Amino acid sequence: MAIDSDLELMLRVSRGDAESFEVLLGRYRLPLVNYVSRLVGDRALGEDLAQEVFLRVYQARERYQPEAKFTTWLYRIATNLALNAIRDRKPEVTAAAAEDDPDGAAIAARLADSRPTAEQQLMARDRERMIRQAVEALPEKQRAAVILHKYQDVEYRQIAKILETSESAVKSLLFRAYESLRGRLEPLLKGGML
């Protein structure tokens, strides 16, 4: 049995096929939640925003025009919603999230090896916290470009479409972001923690 392409599925959705929408939802829900969560730095908000993305996709189904890859359109909607959420968030929200998980233990626990030593756990927690803070400190478009490129493995061309910019601008965003990250994470590089 051949797997339907995203385009075929979305065209069926545009004609009212709810089952095709469920297939797309199943295919992209988790990657989208992961992407948006990394972008906004909050898993619960990421899940809410991913749900909003799919709601908007469904609401726009009849107007869908396959001018770009489905994933480009999907991630553009997600990126715009996430960037708006970042702009709208108050500093108190970030402070409250940090108080709930001050050392990034939840993220470090997900990434930790199945049998690390206590020292390895502490180092992993500290490393993850430093990386997360460095990525979160990037300007919004740089952060989005890094997450799409590094965590979602999206090509430059598609990132350009998602961020509505040129490929050369994406390369420039990533260059500046990685330079900034290198500077911020130099203690990890020197200490052999990366």
Image: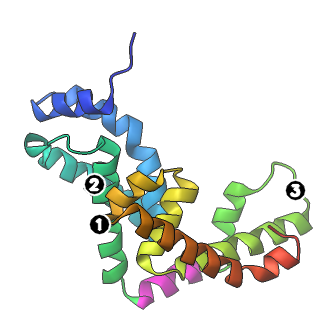
Could you say whether the residue bearing mark 1 is in a helix, strand or loop? helix
Report the span colored magenta.
91-101
Camera-side mark, 3 or 1: 1
Could you say whether the residue bearing mark 2 is in a helix, strand or loop? helix
Q: Are marks 1 and 2 in contact (CB under 8 Å)?
A: yes
Q: Is residue 77 visible?
A: yes
Label 2, on which residue?
A: 53
Give whichever of 42, 134 is nearer the camera. 134
Give whichever of 128, 174 is nearer the camera. 174
> What residue appears at the point 53 percent right and 77 percent down from the top-left corner?
136
The residue lying furthest to the top in this view is 1
Q: Which image quarter: residue 81? A: bottom left
Label 1, on which residue?
A: 81
Q: Is residue 44 visible?
A: no
Marks 1 and 2, the one that precedes in the sequence: 2
Q: Which image quarter: residue 5? A: top left
Marks 3 and 1, the one that precedes in the sequence: 1
Label 3, on which residue?
A: 116
64 left or right of 142 in image: left
* Amino acid type for the residue under numbered disc 3: Pro
